[in-house]
Amino acid sequence: MSTTSSPAALAGGPASTGGVLRLVGAAIALALLIAAPLAIYPVFLMKVLCFALFACAFNLLLGYVGLLSFGHAMFFGGAAYICAHAVKNWGLTPELGILAGVAFAALLGLVAGLLAIRRLGIYFAMVTLALAQMFFFFCLQARFTGGEDGLQGVPRRAVFGLIDITKDLNLYYVVLAIFVIGFAIIYRTIHSPFGQVLKAIRENEPRAISLGYRVNQYKLLAFVLSAALAGLAGATKAIVFQLASLTDVAWQMSGEVILMTLVGGMGTVLGPVVGAGIIVTMQNYLAGFGEWVLVIQGVIFVVVVSLFRRGLVGEVIALFSRQKPGAPAGH
Amino acid sequence: MRLAAMFLAAGSLLAAGAAQAQTPAAPLAVKIGVLNDQSGLYADLGGPGSVWAAKKAVADFLATPAGKNLKVDVVFADHQNKADVGTAIARQWFDVDGVDVILDVPNSGVALAVNQVAKEKNKVFINSGAAASDLTGKACTPNTVHWTYDTWALANGTGKAITKNGGDTWFFITADYAFGHALERDTAAVVAANGGKVVGQVRVPLNNADFSSFLLQAQSSKAKIIGLANAGGDTINSIKQAAEYGIVEGGQKLAGLLIFLSDVNSLGLKTAQGLTLTEAWYWDMTDENRAFAKEFAAANRGVHPTMVHAGVYAGTLHYLKAVAALGADKDGAAVVAEMKKLPTDDKLFGKGEIRADGRQIHPMFLFEVKKPSESKYPYDYYTLKATIPANEAFRPLSESECPLVKKS
């Protein structure tokens, strides 16, 4: 993937062939997404979109800053709780509930980020895991979360007072719009000068410091952005399923999003989307196999990690850049 | 000529219509979905065994004259103890796959979520595996029946029967979250109401591995009964470590407030002996139960059925009776209304009824786990200590928060 050409393409400047191809690809993908609920069950698609956004937000941190957070469930689930509570008990409309969830996740991300970015590697992962576990126990104990029963029966009020989302199909397009907005933010971030600095930090942090960048501020901003977008995904999920539960804040959720990102390909724009699609599809359509779901999931993870080290999308990109000698190597 | 052709065509259409009306009605198709934990924490108490129990109930009902006009399919899925996975499956079953009724659903969080979906889609939800008494309390719906047990029944049964049998001083080891607090509060109220006394309690974090200090506190409290207001792995760990401390040999008794035959089986009698617990059904009580257990064990690698399995069997059977009586299955609330109207009667739970709040009423039993030397054959685990009659076993309607009850 040639990263230099895309800002030009987005800005409408003299686009390279890669940029045009990418725009055409995006248009086709969007058309497919708009037509998808005609063929596939909308609730399932919404779930895929929520997790895809979550995985993309996570990938922003892991793939582009090189920070492995093991606590992203706290942003995802925290926003889900706040959104569900705001809509159910304060009577807010869904869009305000989602915004409240995002704001909470960003704030939580700021606090967690301030503590976590002081460390690197495994220590960073452990700090985020510890904070997420603290948050999990807070949710378990707090009165408003309903303990292990969770928050149930979140009403689906009309979005902006106009769009009736009690119909799954209408809600699907709302969720699709949210996903596209979130995805666009991530895409823009990655391909901005800010994103270039993030990648520089990932590749060689001391050199980035020596070039005069305030690395910690960049990392913190990326962390908050990632947390807020994870919150956007979680809050949307709370509206879709009309519930928020401990599943969303448990450490397994943090693990699942890592799995999605690795299967799809970390550090690629589309990888997390594909990974989320694969994992959610397995969870849904293999549910009939009962106890075998987890075994199959494990086998796929082992296969991907040992055979496709770059993840599925990463391998495809590597294959194409190998076939086109002279093209910039994909990252 | 053309006119004649038209008359002929019209005539043949009428004839065809008449012929169709005369053919016997197509069998009523019913689709049953068993939604539970197939692989995790609750797989042993429900899991694949519940699917077998539902299929067995279908086979038994289709063999009766009332079942001859039904065509029943059973599907199942694993909700992985996640409320979102559970509701996604429930929605898909109702919307796309034409499932009419969902059964079992252990894990209160998932059960309460599925409860909402069943109401929204006007289908039927018959719960056997979950403990939440809210399902027939403030979360009750006209589409839900709660069959086997609930936290109120367990707290009441264990608290009351033990206190009356002389266990009048209690110490609670409580899991420190809403569920544990509720279980402790309910049981303590029952103990106090029956003349007993709570001498102390200790709150333990969820998923705790080391119970030693809490057990020592319980031991030094000299309470006759140590109530375990926790669930799952916490209950297992506390019982195991209590055995290591010789608490039962020391004269104190453990009372499990949420523990099943499958838990006793995995603990082993050496560890679990002397434990007192409440269940709705035990396989070794009547010949009918034993026959059911024998068939169940033959199909499930020798495992014996828990009360949850029995509840799935009885719930499925009663659902099919109501559908056959009604001759329709698409209006979930109507089927549940019919289920409430018909008295329940099956070979496992005997005669009973379903109340206005959706609670199925039957006796509960207080058991003590046998010593290894007393156990004569596989799964010979319990001694019956007391029977709690049906009219005392469940939360009285007068205390119900269920809106369905207030209206009537």
Image (spheres, coloured by chain):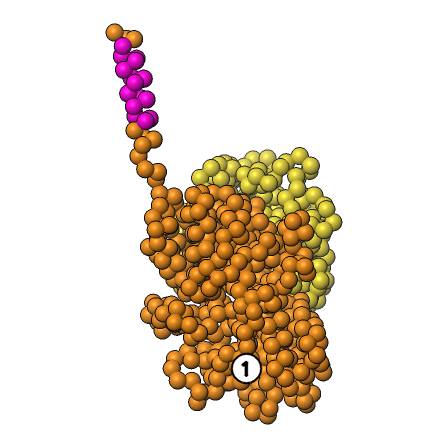
Query: Which region shows up in magenta?
Result: B4-18
View extreme (right): residue: A90
The three-letter amino acid code for the residue at tag 1 is: Leu
Q: Position of residue A178 (x, y in %)?
A: 61, 43
Q: Residue at x 57, y 72 (%)?
A: B388
- The residue tagged 1 is B275
- On the question of residue A202 being in view, the answer is no
- Front position in the image: A240 or B284: B284
- On the question of residue A181 being in view, the answer is yes
- Front position in the image: A215 or A59: A59
Q: Secondary structure at mark 1?
A: loop
From the image, state the color of chain B: orange
Q: Residue at x 48, y 62 (%)?
A: B351
Where's the N terminus of chain B, which quadrant? top left
- Front position in the image: B283 or A101: B283
The rendered magenta stretch, by its main secondary structure, is classed as helix
The chain displayed yellow equals: A
Q: Position of residue B197 (x, y in %)?
A: 71, 81
